[in-house]
Amino acid sequence: MEHEKIVVGLDIGTTKICAIVGRKNEFGKLEVLGMGKAESEGVVKGIVFNIDKTVYAIEKAIKEASDQSGIDIGVVNVGIAGQHIKSFVQHGGITRSSKEDEITVDDIERLTQDMYRMVVPPGSQIIHVMPQDYMVDYEEGIKEPVGMSGVRLEADFHVITAQTNAINNIHKCVRKAGLEIEDLILEPLASSLAVLSDEEKEAGVCLIDIGGGTTDIAIFYDNIIRHSAVIPFGGNIVTNDIKQGLMVLQQQAERLKTSFGRAIAEEANANEIVAIPGIRNRDTKEISVKNLSNIIQARMEEIIEMAHSEIIASGYENRLAGGIVITGGGAQLANLKQLVEYMTGMDTRVGYPNEHLGKGKVEIVKSPMYATAVGLVLSGFRSLDEREDRYKEAREVIRTVKAKKPVSMPSSSKNFFNDILTKTKSLLIDDLNDKNEY
């Protein structure tokens, strides 16, 4: 195992902090070796507000995952979310020195790195620059320009920024927990790796990740990220509505939501009553499941309406043949799929992070609430943009070719053929020696 690549995903969420350890098996599937989680008390709406409490929860989750997997964890992939996340499309371009030479992977890399140097609002920092469509000598709609000839190389980029303070606080928490960050990844992009298929991304799909503090949106079309957004409402605000509307404790409200709540009140039985213990020897309190579901439906309709507005604003509403995929802890709410379909008119399914999972020690990770954590592990093996994987392979081939020393051409033909014979003889001897070793 010491020669295998091990990746750890750390999801610092509003309700829980989760660490997952994984590796690729012989079939190319993700095998989960261990998982740890802890209650998140220092995070509000995806932003770290209490360093010490967050560090304690990270240490607890990491220790549990380390003990279960037998892996000494030192480096993690971390997710980032929150209302401070902003995204926009920016056009960029470079001028190449020659139109005769083919566009190379290095040209693509130079264009992308130029975008990281663009000016952003004070207090913000670029976390992702993802190319959409390229343009070569003003010819539009090119997905992969490598190998083409041209002088002017341009592209539209999906740029995602985050508050510098929020990023620094995450880094501070992770370092205080004795860890280093390999990559900082926007959470809906990580979730998309876990729950979306390549066919859905190509056909067009909207991912709605309903977490505890936020609801994250990611829209894909033609296998490329087209739009992303963060809505500052999640499952916790539904719990707070239940707490205030029914005058119960926070824990009781959460349990009522998960055990008896429905996203469509009409589906609830009007005669069903739930009795909960009273406070300090007071009488038990009877709660109508119908009233409970009415409270839940009102808030979920608001969240879905805001998500639908983001789909419309993206301009891809009528091009999403894959419809909507809902994931995250909030996706487990009964009848939510039907409510989303009713309000948006789009086909909807619940996204489970088992698209790329193989057999592992921990089966609970197949729940939608662990989609982000699983995606953070997958991001260690796969790029957010599939084209980047091909570019990496191309770079390795170029490095391998450059590493080989070229054979110089001798001045005379006689010396040339003698040189070839000598080299051939040497290669044959080396080949025989290799076979003898086996």
Image: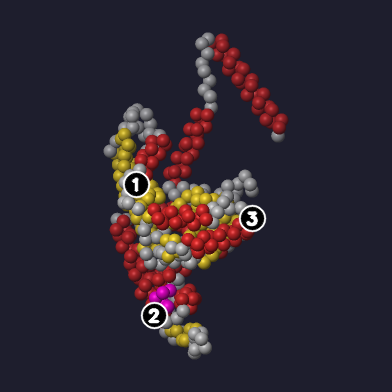
The residue where tag 3 is placed is 70
Q: Which amino acid does label 3 sit on?
A: Gly
Tag 1, which secondary structure?
strand
Identify the residue shown where x is 29% and y is 39%: 139
Residue 62 forms part of the magenta stretch: no
Q: Quadrant of the C terminus?
A: top right
What crowding class fits label 2: few (fewer than 14 Cα within 10 Å), some (14-19), or many (20 or more)?
Answer: few
The residue where tag 1 is placed is 157
Residue 109 visible in rendering? yes
User: Which mark is on residue 365?
Assistant: none
Asked where in the image residue 34 lies, by quadrant, the reply is bottom right
Rounded to the nearest angstrom, the CA distance separating label 3 from label 1 is 41 Å
Residue 417 higher or lower than 171, as above or below: above
Which SS type dominates the magenta stretch?
helix
Q: Which amino acid does label 2 sit on?
A: Gly
Disc 3 and disc 2 in contact, CB within 8 angstroms: no
Q: Earlier in the sequence, mark 3 or mark 2?
A: 3
Q: Nearer the viewer, residue 76 or 100?
A: 76
Tag 3, which secondary structure?
loop
Query: Residue most toward the left?
Result: 138
Asked where in the image residue 262 lies, by quadrant, the reply is bottom left
Identify the residue shown where x is 31% and y is 63%: 309
The residue where tag 2 is placed is 245
Which residues are drawn in magenta? 239-244
Q: Nearer the viewer, residue 265 or 250?
A: 250
Q: Which of 13 and 216 is in front in this view?
A: 13
Query: Residue most toward the bottom?
Result: 283
Residue 368 higher or lower than 296, as above or below: above
Q: Which amino acid does label 1 sit on?
A: Phe
